[in-house]
Amino acid sequence: MTRYILIILALFAGHLLFSQSGKVNLLLDQLSRDESDTNRVIHLYQLCSAYRLMGDYNSSLTYGKQALQLASELRYKQGIANAYGNIANAYCMRSNYPEAIKNHKESMELRQELGDKRGIAETYHNLGAIYDKQGEYALALQSYTASLAIDEEIEDWRNAIITSNNIGVIYERRGNYSDAISIYFSALSRVNSVSQQDIESNFNIYQNIGNVYLHQGKYEEALKHYLASMDFEKKRNNKQGIADSYNNLGVVYCSQKKYHLALKQHASSLELKLEIGDKQGVAVSYINTGNVYIKQKYYTKALDLQYQALSVYKMIGDKHGICVAYILLGQTQSLLNKPDDAERFLNHAMSLNQELQNIELNMEIYRAFATLNNILSVQRGQSLKNKEAKMMKAIGYYKLWLNSLDSLSNKPKMAGN
């Protein structure tokens, strides 16, 4: 099964701060001495951003809403726009995508009124990040492309690099690994040549390079990049980034059949994700822990986690995640010799992926149907004609899987369950 990896997307807003606790303390000190003026608004939404980067989303929303209220009282339009943007980013990290989109659109309206091109580019970018999380790839690519055009117009090369990187994420989602890896390395080279201060961008690119190597079965290269990301996030004390790194390390260890290490990494990831309220990340942990149990033939344990993941994905409206859960549930029901349930889940996945148009998901659906029909073809108590029909269906789905594999630009190695 394709590993559903939580990609670290660049979510940025004006006056972005790194998440060291020292900077939070500095802002709190400044806030204690502020009058009720525009400086206080700025410090409030800077705190909103800083707490978000630390994974404290409740505090982030508290300060963001205070910034919005004061900016509105002062009729400080730039402050209102920035507050909306920071509030939207916090909602996004809580997987509350409708509220995130709503606040970004409020921010966009004001930024367009003010002629704030940098802010417009950032808002397009952040909308792209949300659409990507929802599996709305066409909308994500449209938003990222709009952001990149403005970044290049105003010569904001740092954000152009981040946006180019996330366009690479979309290519990766589509299974176009050659273009994805090319864009990632190009962006990384540009970061190193333009500025040594863009360490945040370096992290995102390294993480995504690791994802591509994982898809290609180059596990040692994937580990190298994920470990570099983990080291950076620990220095940042960024719980979200640490949790995501644990997850991806767990996926690699599972691929290497180091199941004890894989379960340990996923447990650490899940603990942090529950702590910070990352619903999408919780679902990812359920999925990937279930994948380890599948490898160990603990099918009932895996099934329970897959149902939990499906419930979370439906709650937050993550179409890609829903499709992944349907496929996994279909595969596991096949392994438990429940063909009717397996076929029902796989049909749900196929219907949903007609909307998503994700090549990798198509491949996994075809392979799952091929396996299911192969199992049905050897069951006792049926006529020879039925057995042959099931075998022909299995062969037909296998051919569809091969055709999908050929459609990938560099024919990556696909690791099985």
Image (cartoon, grey):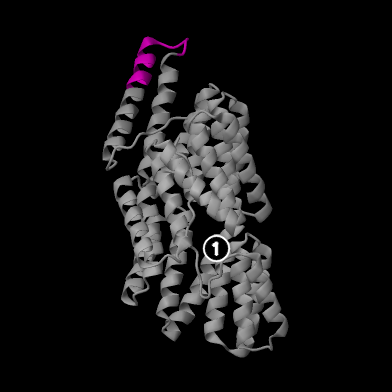
Residue marked by disc 1? 98
Q: Magenta: predominant secondary structure element?
A: helix
Residue 391: within the magenta?
Answer: yes
Q: Amino acid at mark 1?
A: Pro
* Residue 324 percent location from the top left of the image: 48, 41
Any part of residue 385 in sight: yes
The residue located at (34%, 58%) in the rendering is: 189
Q: Which of the 4 image quarters holds residue 218?
A: top left
264 horizontally vs 362: left or right: right
Tell me where the magenta segment starts and ends, as one range.
379-392
Residue extending farthest to the right is 32
x and y, in percent, of residue 381 in the image: 47, 10
Q: Nearer the viewer, residue 127 or 239?
A: 239
Mark 1 residue crowding within 10 angstroms, few (<14) / some (14–19) / many (20+): some
Query: Residue at left 43%, top 81%?
Result: 116
**Residue at image coords 65%, 68%:** 22
| Residue 57, image x, y percentages | 64, 62
Task: Give the SS element for disc 1.
Answer: helix
